[in-house]
Image: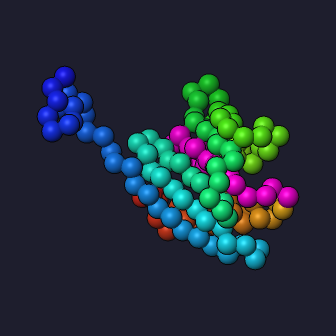
């Protein structure tokens, strides 16, 4: 490999990571969304305060129509990040990392969060 100006000239060009943020007031709570678009997928952080309490990853499988998902970090009894990552992978056909940092006591909030993500994906498909 030939190093020129700190870059490997023997490798193909790598797509830059792009960041997209949006917020919405849902059920009297301001929810923040942070999306990092990666090559072949994206990372989605959802929360009200700056914490990373869990992380799930999901990807398509040639062996099953339902995407594979696993929890990398956090409480395994909370299936919200896993199921959200799985649904987003199914929708986008991409590898998806999800960190969902909101209380899961209100299923209405989870539904509103997912609807807001879908709305943003329709408005800005290039960010995901």
Query: Is 63 on the left-hand or right-hand side of 109?
Result: left
Q: Indicate whether 52 appears above or below 125.
A: above
Q: Indicate whether 22 appears above or below 40.
A: below
Point out the stretch of residues depicted in magenta: 88-105
Q: Quadrant of the rendered structure where residue 22 is?
A: bottom right
Residue depicted at 40% across the width and 55% down the height: 18
Let me know if residue 95 is in the magenta part.
yes
Residue depicted at 47% across the width and 52% down the height: 36
Confirm whether residue 51 shows in the render. Answer: yes
Let me know if residue 57 is in the magenta part.
no
**Residue 28: x, y in percent?**
75, 77
Query: Is 3 on the left-hand or right-hand side of 56?
Result: left
**Residue 59: x, y in percent?**
57, 36
Q: Residue furthest top?
A: 1
Between 119 and 22, the one lying in front of the other is 22
Residue depicted at 83% across the width and 40% down the height: 77
Residue depicted at 57% across the width and 27% down the height: 62
């Amino acid at each position: 490999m030939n190093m020129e100006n700190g870059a490997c000239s023997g490798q193909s060009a790598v797509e830059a990571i792009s960041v997209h943020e949006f917020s919405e007031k849902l059920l009297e709570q301001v929810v923040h969304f942070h999306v990092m678009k990666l090559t072949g997928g994206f990372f989605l952080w959802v929360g009200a305060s700056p914490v990373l309490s869990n992380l799930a990853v999901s990807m398509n499988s040639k062996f099953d129509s339902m995407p594979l998902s696993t929890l990398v970090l956090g409480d395994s009894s909370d299936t919200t990040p896993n199921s959200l990552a799985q649904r987003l992978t199914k929708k986008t056909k991409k590898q998806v990392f999800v960190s969902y940092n909101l209380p899961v006591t209100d299923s209405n909030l989870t539904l509103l969060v997912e609807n807001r993500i879908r709305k943003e994906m329709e408005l800005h498909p290039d960010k995901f």
